[in-house]
Amino acid sequence: MKTINELKDEKKAIFSIKNLNLWYGNDQALKNINIDIMEKEVTAIIGPSGCGKSTFIKTLNRMVEMIPIVKTSGEILYHGKNIFDKGFGVEELRTTVGMVFQKPNPFPKSIYENVVYGPKIHGIKDKRKLMEIAEESLKSAALWDEVKDRLNDNAYGLSGGQQQRLCIARCLAIQPDVLLMDEPTSALDPIATHRVEGLIEELKNHYTIVIVTHSMHQAARISDNTAFFLSGDLIEFGKTQAIFSKPRDKRTEDYITGRFG
Amino acid sequence: MECKITKNNELNVENLKKKIKKRIMIDKSAKLVFLLSALFALLVLGILIYRIFTQSIGWLDIQFLTSKLSIFPEKAGIFGAIVGSFLLMVIVAPVTIILGVSTAIYLEEYSSKGRLQTLIKTNISNLAGVPSVIFGLLGLTVFGRLLNLGSSILAGGLTMSLLVLPIVVVASQEAIRAVPGFLRDASYAMGASKWTTISRVVLPVALPGILTGSILALSRAIGETAPLVVLGIPTLILKIPQNIMDDFTALPIQIYYWTLDTVLTAEYANLAAATIVVLLLMLFTLNSIAIIIRNKFQRRY
């Protein structure tokens, strides 16, 4: 018989990153990263500016390749398949691995059109079905009550926090398995930040979340696992509680106690 | 520490006062010079418009707009030229917009920064600097002779398209480049392909800029004369063109020939003036539409 804790540890790894290296031209931004992202858990990536945390998260949906000089080596297994393989469709990957960016980036369209953008480009045409998806996604993103009477208004009329939740709703509308969040609250005020954090708490019951954050408090508050990056190296990775109470590495301790970074 | 700034003699109050006075003088005269330069163009335009309007009074009426050409000034009208100019635009608009926007999309979104891209970009800038007479020769060689289109509306339209293509390409490129990268990222991150992203996100946002550039290009094409002269548009056409393979005449051509022939019949000057009024009104309308579009779709992100 296994104990409950052992059973918990048997949660599946949705991403298995093996010996990942990444270069921007000649500058190496990620050095031999090995990490497992567990299903339906929140993994926080912390570290000082320029440590490679944003690069890392953008590698998971291959958005990093938008920069033409990027080269990678190693493997990222997603559900056991290497996302760098030739036969692996990057469009397909991105429909199941959604991303929320640092700065809210809604399209200059109506709130409704923003949410149904994903479903529409993936072939859903039925108006009633689209409306259903829009309502569901906006409800999941805790935005429905605020916008239900003005779905046809331009998204840029919303406040920054609302825009970011709209971007989360837009992401949820394609029903991804994983949500990548690249400092989603860094452009928001404390109240909006609080709301988005509460939303992440809700969402982690249904989605695997990887979140890059500048704020150690945020990592401690919302994540199950934490990875600490420093100049392209993964210094420490483990349960958030353990990392914040008993860091194994001196550099991790220095960073989380605010001695640098 | 001891402060060691010695008083500079040049900076005493009396000296400064003099200098400031001088500077204010220079400032005033500079303003005057620039104002006069600005007024010069305006003055010339004013004279032109005044002369044209006074000369065209009495000649510009419904009969003038709806009659065919004639060698008798009292009976002459520009209906044929209006239809010719209109049909010319029917060719120029779709050809330039489709080719121009496609070229811009390729250059901005698809081509990798390499030799081919540099080559195309340089050539487009070069093309923009080529005199219109030379475009006329190009059109004569390729469309008129090689493709045997003669001096038809089709030949004229294609030649004009070549002439204004660089305007549309450059304007569209700028509009596409101005679409912020974070909008593209949002689309790609949802699994959209390149073309989906371009057609659903980039082009709608860039559309006002593209439209403005296209309309300005069209107004340039309406007013161009030289390429059509080189193509050999006949001097006097009494038939109204029926389709794009017909011979034709256009408004600027008509102005050109009537002005040339004033030595034969003095009233032709009045006909030319009346035609200029019509042409200018068309151009002002087009340009106003461009400005309205630009103002209406100010950046919303």
Image (cartoon, rainbow, N blue to C red):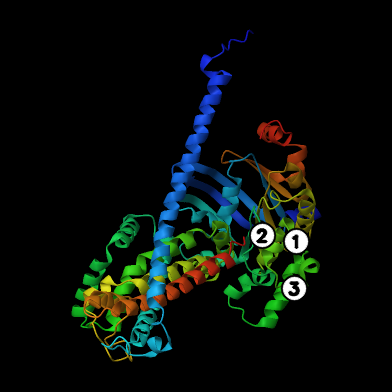
Q: Which residue is mark 3?
A: A135
Q: Secondary structure at mark 3?
A: helix
Q: Which residue is mark 2?
A: A179
Above or below: residue B177 compared with residue B68: above
Q: Is residue A7 left or right of residue B212?
A: right
Closer-to-camera residue (B10/A147) = B10
The chain holding disc 3 is A
Q: Is residue A194 left or right of residue B224?
A: right
Residue B55 location, quadrant: bottom left
Going from N to C along the chain, the mark reached first, 1 or 2, is: 2
Residue A82: x percent and y percent? 53, 59
The residues tagged by marks 1 and 3 sit, at their Cα atoms, a distance apart of 16 Å
Above or below: residue B59 compared with residue A70: below
Q: Which residue type carries mark 3?
A: Glu
Q: Are marks 1 and 2 in contact (CB under 8 Å)?
A: yes
Q: Residue at x 27, y 74 (%)?
A: B259
On residue A203, which mark appears? 1
Q: Which residue type carries mark 2?
A: Leu
Above or below: residue A129 compared with residue B187: below
The residues tagged by marks 2 and 3 sit, at their Cα atoms, a distance apart of 19 Å
For discs 2 and 3, the disc positioned in front in the rendered view: 3
